[in-house]
Amino acid sequence: AFEVHEIVVPHIGHVPVAKGDFKYLPKQVQDFVTQWVDVCQPRAVYICDGSVEEAEEITAKLMERGTLHKLTKYPNTYICRTDPRDVARVESRTVVCSVDRYATECHTKDGAASQLAHWISPENMDAAMQERFPGCMAGRMMYVIPFSMGPIGSPLSKIGVELTDSNYVVLCMRLMTRVSHDIWRVLGNNEFVRCLHSVGCPRPVNYRVVNHWSCNPEKVIIAHMPDDRMVVSYGSGYGGNSLLGKKCFALRIAGRIAYDEGWMAEHMLIMSVTNPKGVEKFFVAAFPSACGKTNLAMIQPTLPGYTVRCVGDDIAWMRFNKDGQLMAINPENGFFGVAPGTNHQTNPNAMAALQRDCILTNVAETADGGYFWEGLEDEVDKDIPITTWLGKPYKIGSKENYPSSHPNSRFTAPAKNCPIMHPKWEDPAGVPISGIIFGGRRPEGVPLVIEAEDWKHGVFLGAQVKSEATAAAEFKGKQIMHDPMAMRPFLGYNFGKYLQHWLDMEKPGRKMPKIFHVNWFRKDQNEKFLWPGFGENIRVLDWMMRRVDGEDIAEPTAVGLVPKEGSINTDGLNINWKELFSIPPDYWKGDIHETRRYLEEQVGDDIPPVLRSELDRVEARVDAM
Ligand code: GTP
Ligand code: SPV
Ligand code: MN
């Protein structure tokens, strides 16, 4: 005879804990999980520990379901095709909740709709959640992901917990942030950023799921509650909409924390350049989405004797230390980079990072189990059969089923895969910043590089940033859009206050970095780029380094300082200097008036007086051109 022992599965309410020890979680996390288990009603709860075994288990599930597909050419590398309706950030459904509308939005002129952060009232926020979250995880697993933005336990790092019903999100969060069991110990009784995500497809699902990718495009919302340090996202599984540590936490919520605490959270790469004399300087650069941060952060310099090393490619957290030096850390742990255009010519260091342990989303696949996208034509067998991101056959050079990959298809790669990571990329003290670079896609009128006259003028240069729309969000066509500081989609509070915060960074005793604006994307009459870009951008970085050292190689113009003719090394390039650096008066008159119109409409009475006087000053000079 034998006794039957009941296996006791721990429960949260009536919901079983499938993995992990709920009792081990800090009390405030237990409360957070319990609260949302009650609302979302998952079939079970899975507490992630970030281990390799866990990733293998989840990967196997995703392969079984058909969401992930193994690429046999590279170890531990997978391809994922989303529902074609869920391929980019959705700016129009990204909102910030505050009691006071003007904590989030500016006092726009005549009540014009805000393009710089979208406000949602607490009442409408409650209603939006009531409509979506009750029962939204029915029949699904709720994953509890403990993560750190920045090295675990470092004083500048911040901890978040994401609850999600997407196992794709679990795998990507493991690559993009630090997910670990150690988080619970480091967190102790402290507060954390609360992140709640659901694809919005409770079971039973009574409609066709496209590509085994669950999402709910009609009901998408990405909402932020900066006062509660909380992010709520529903309906999309894509990148910036679902990997809540990234844009939602590290920019929108952290931006607000940074405002309160006197530091900065910016959409910036971090890199260093070492010149042939062995002198190293660090730069950060803010370009709008899909405008070249990843590429610049990893460039292979074409000038001999120069070395570039990468600290980060998308987000910088920065603060002045007690010596008045601006220090930057990269809060991320991986790259979520634009695939098209990436190849061994343009970005060999990214290609090196894509040789193992990656997830590729919405790219094409070659018949021999490799990845393919626009830009890799010369790196695969010309006749090889290709399957597009939509599952259609494709041959290189053919118009049929072109493009093979979605223009916003992306790779997710661990940072440690990149061969030029800076030895200090995880240094808790950060790296010292000498220069801040703004830029955008400006086919017309804007010279290769402009240097700000001082900090105030630099803040104005940042506020002036515009760029052609890209596939990173839902905008159609190549319209030129304002994207001040490359932060339009990522603001978590009133943009006028954000500008004032930038101005307030300048204080006696602080070494203010020089500020620049670059444009790799100016075109000639035949629509050809005037500048070769990529590795050749080292020539502009070299000029900036010399400017940081005070070399007399810049001359004043109405819009800022520009290189004296010949002061950028263009040896071996076939460059039309005049065209590349010209500042056409008519273009700039139109542009500065349009910028005034934009700032007066969108920022209105919230324009800081100092910034308004910069606008007046530059406009008067341009009008006199
Ligand atoms: P997010 O990840 O969306 O924030 O974008 P990002 O700023 O990191 O952009 P990324 O470096 O991925 O560049 C996007 C596209 O711009 C790619 O298709 C690149 O090939 C192209 N690109 C990058 N640098 C240059 C350059 O110097 N010249 C030209 N012509 N194109 C470039
Ligand atoms: C961007 O759009 O700026 C990105 C990609 O870096 S996402 O994470 O989707 O925001
Ligand atoms: Mn980005």
Image (cartoon, rainbow, N blue to C red):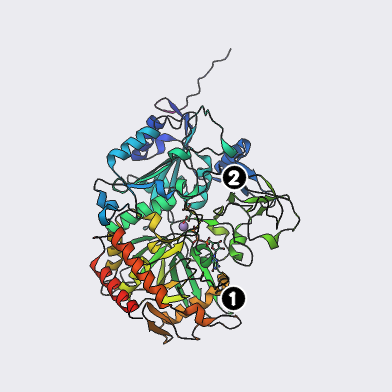
Residue 378 image offset from top left, x and y in percent? 70, 63
**Which of the numbered marks, if any, corresponds to residue 81?**
2
Nearer to us in this view, 531 or 52: 531
The kind of residue on which mark 2 rests is Arg
In the picture, the quarter occupied by the N terminus is: top right
User: Which x, y percent locates residue 377?
Assistant: 68, 60
Task: Describe residue 63's horizontal placement relative to residue 586 as left or right.
Answer: right
- Residue appearing at x 57%, y 61% in the figure: 418
With 209 as the anchor, is 457 left or right in this view?
left
Q: Secondary structure at mark 2?
A: loop
Q: Which mark is residue 302?
A: 1
Specify whether residue 374 is painted magenta. no
Q: Which residues are magenta?
A: 9-13
Q: If the image is split into quadrants, where does the C terminus sit?
A: bottom left
Find residue 352 and report its horizontal and vertical position in percent. 62, 61
SS of the residue under disc 1: loop
Would you place residue 172 above or below residue 305 in this image? above
Q: Residues within 10 Å of mark 2 (few under 14, many from 20)?
A: many
Residue at the extreme right: 383
Mark identifier at residue 376: none
